[in-house]
Image (spheres, rainbow, N blue to C red):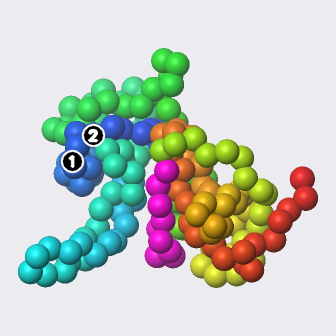
Amino acid sequence: MSEKTNWFVMYTAPRAEKKVAQRLVEKGTEVYLPLIEEVRQWSDRKKKVKRPLFNGYIFVRTSRERLWEALQVSGAVKFVNFSGEHAVVQQSEIDTIKRIIETGVAVEVETENIEKGENVRILGGPLQGFEGECVQKSNQDYFIIRIPSINQSMLVNVPRKFLEVLKV
């Protein structure tokens, strides 16, 4: 009988996300580390680098019984807990993050609490078909993807013409 697995949220040492993910994969553990590409400017050159979307977090698919084992890799700090329970991320949340990363749209991460926005459906562009909330920030419309398990939200700028307000 196989153990039930879930996506758990692991907190890593600062800037150790890639190394921890690699070490876990080498041990046969399924890991998801959302990376976004950005251009970094140095004094003598520009370089495209991939950096973690959520600083200090990786998603680990394992069973509750094997959480301790995953923490044995160097750079792993702890699993995120809420009220004594390990935070579990739904497969649908992982799929949403993957789909957004795959489209290559510019994503901002917000750790502050964002007030409830308008309910909308995206009508065009790479995120067509997504339903969720939209908020205004600096006179622009942003589609919000909330990731409650890590208390963070992804914000994607979507022009108003691509949004249909849904009646609740």
Nearest the camera: 120 or 131? 120
The image quadrant that residue 118 belongs to is: bottom right
- The residue located at (51%, 25%) in the rendering is 82
Q: Which amino acid does label 1 sit on?
A: Ala
Q: Is residue 104 above or below residue 67?
A: below
Residue 69 in the figure: left or right of residue 129:
left
**Residue 79 lies within the magenta run:** no
Nearer to the camera, 145 or 135: 135
Residue designated by label 1? 16
Which residue occupies 37% across, 31% down?
A: 79
Which residue reaches farthest top?
Answer: 84
Q: Which structural element holds mark 1? A: loop
Which residue range is magenta in the image? 101-110
Amino acid on which disc 2 is placed? Thr
Q: Is residue 106 magenta?
A: yes
Query: Do tag 1 and tag 2 residues touch (Cβ < 8 Å)?
Result: yes
Alpha carbon of mark 1 to alpha carbon of mark 2: how far? 6 Å
Q: Name the residue under label 2.
A: 12
- Which residue occupies 23% across, 43% down? 14
Which residue does the image show at 48% across and 40% down from the upper left?
Answer: 150
